[in-house]
């Protein structure tokens, strides 16, 4: 007679078991059934010293349970060895308690006498293993190949990994949408807002692109040629700051400028913007960002767990000036000439309902100038305030915008000293 390699099933020889053929057949069927669903419990304390060579009665079952028991003297962890040439599938449970391996908590290693690879099973865990007669290994343990190209963020694509050029991260920049950032640089605009001066260009800047920054959040179209470009719509008095130029039609949903810690570009061409929330959390130092979480909260908004305050913007009045709410919620107006109501220009491209601007008004040191108010300003009791005429006086104008009426609701605190 002979026996099969992997499960040691008897193969009767010709003319054997005359009139008793049922004995090996029934025994084999019982063994086969046990190989499909049986469980064998192994107690390392009953086998002697590790490594322990398993016999067929110990490895036939697909489920092997290694009991928690005091180990034999002379070893801490236990190794079970399959005979060379024996292959198969097993689910192996190490029932020793979790924690640092000791005489009651230990690792279980399953190896092959064929001398190949082995699998280590930690305390309190169950692992699916496979053997090929030489090696013992975990099925599907090979690395999963990433989809798409380098920098493309992975996502669930019908149950498999997917990647897209429209969703990338290069270690610094998150890009969402189908427009690729073309160029980064530093830029500033003049008092008219139509001229953009650029420095430190990295990439290729060209007419027809749109430029974005903290001061130009909705983007302006570039025309002409550098280093002084014409932009439309005009955005006046943007101080020098990091900017990015993109292909026409892109929309930047968020841009926080250094040194406050920033997402360099967060870009989408979808008109609906991000239907989620950007959470910036942690206690990192200035210029760092610990975590960025993009979720599905509606309406879309940005939440900051630490204060983010843009630098105050300084404006010289002359006889006319432009106040751009997008630059900062703190602005400083120095009186260098008298201004009539018509001398105000308030940039409306990026106004947000409820936005409040604090404007410090400093009277001239040698000549007292006057300041008129736009017709869109509303005052308590309908009486417009008058700025201080004392030379060098500092007043504080607080103005809050209401989209429902299109008016600014204002108060003036005078003559701080």
Image (cartoon, helix red, strand yellow):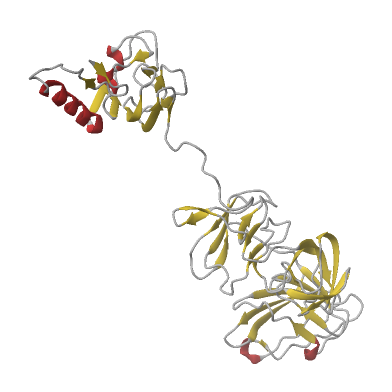
Outermost left residue: 19
Residue 203 vs residue 110, the one in the foreground: 110
Q: Determine whether 16 is above or below 89 in the image.
A: above
Q: Position of residue 172 (x, y in %)?
A: 68, 52
On the rendered structure, is 396 left or right of 46? right
Picture coordinates of residue 261, whole percent (x, y): 68, 55
Q: Nearer the viewer, residue 406 or 266?
A: 266
Residue 122 visible in the current orientation:
no
Most foreground residue, 206 or 333: 206
| Residue 102, quarter of picture | top left
Left or right: where does residue 354 sit relative to residue 103?
A: right
Rendered residue at 32%/21% (across/down): 5
| Position of residue 196 in the picture relative to residue 140 (left or right) | right
At 81% from the left edge and 87% from the top edge, which residue is drawn? 343
Viewer-nearest residue: 19 or 244: 19
Residue 167 in view: yes
């Amino acid at each position: 007679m002979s026996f099969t390699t992997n499960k040691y099933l008897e193969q009767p020889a010709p003319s054997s078991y005359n009139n008793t053929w049922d004995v090996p057949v029934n025994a084999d069927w019982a063994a086969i059934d046990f190989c499909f669903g049986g469980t064998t419990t192994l107690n390392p304390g009953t086998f002697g010293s590790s490594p322990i060579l398993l016999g067929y009665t110990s490895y036939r079952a697909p489920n092997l349970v290694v009991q928690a028991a005091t180990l034999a003297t002379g070893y801490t962890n236990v190794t079970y060895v399959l005979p060379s040439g024996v292959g198969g599938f097993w689910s192996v449970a190490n029932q020793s308690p979790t924690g640092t391996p000791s005489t009651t908590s230990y690792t279980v290693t399953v190896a092959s006498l064929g001398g190949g690879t082995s699998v280590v099973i930690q305390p309190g865990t169950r692992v699916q293993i496979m053997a090929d007669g030489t090696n013992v290994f975990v099925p599907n343990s090979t690395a999963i190949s990433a989809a798409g190209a380098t920098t493309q963020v992975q996502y669930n694509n019908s149950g498999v990994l997917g990647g897209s050029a429209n969703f990338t991260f290069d270690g610094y920049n998150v890009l969402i949408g189908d427009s690729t950032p073309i160029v980064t640089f530093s830029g500033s605009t003049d008092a008219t807002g139509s001229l953009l001066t650029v420095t430190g260009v990295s990439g290729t800047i060209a007419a027809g692109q749109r430029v974005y920054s903290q001061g130009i959040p909705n983007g302006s179209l570039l025309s002409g040629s550098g280093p002084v470009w014409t932009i439309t719509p005009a955005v006046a008095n943007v101080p020098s700051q990091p900017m990015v130029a993109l292909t026409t039609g892109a929309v930047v949903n968020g841009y926080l400028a250094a040194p406050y810690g920033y997402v360099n570009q967060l870009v989408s061409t979808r008109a609906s913007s991000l239907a989620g929330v950007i959470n910036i959390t942690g206690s990192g130092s200035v210029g760092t960002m610990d975590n960025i979480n993009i979720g599905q909260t509606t309406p879309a908004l940005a939440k900051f767990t630490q204060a983010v305050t843009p630098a105050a913007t300084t404006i010289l009045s002359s006889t006319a000036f432009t106040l751009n709410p997008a630059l900062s919620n703190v602005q400083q107006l120095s009186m260098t000439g008298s201004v009539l109501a018509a001398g105000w220009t308030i940039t409306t491209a990026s106004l947000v309902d409820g936005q409040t601007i604090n404007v410090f008004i400093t009277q001239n040191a040698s000549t007292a100038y006057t300041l008129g108010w736009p017709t869109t300003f509303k005052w308590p009791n309908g009486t417009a305030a008058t700025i201080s005429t004392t030379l060098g006086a500092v007043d504080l104008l607080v103005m809050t915008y209401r989209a429902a009426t299109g008016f600014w609701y204002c108060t003036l605190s005078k003559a701080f000293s």
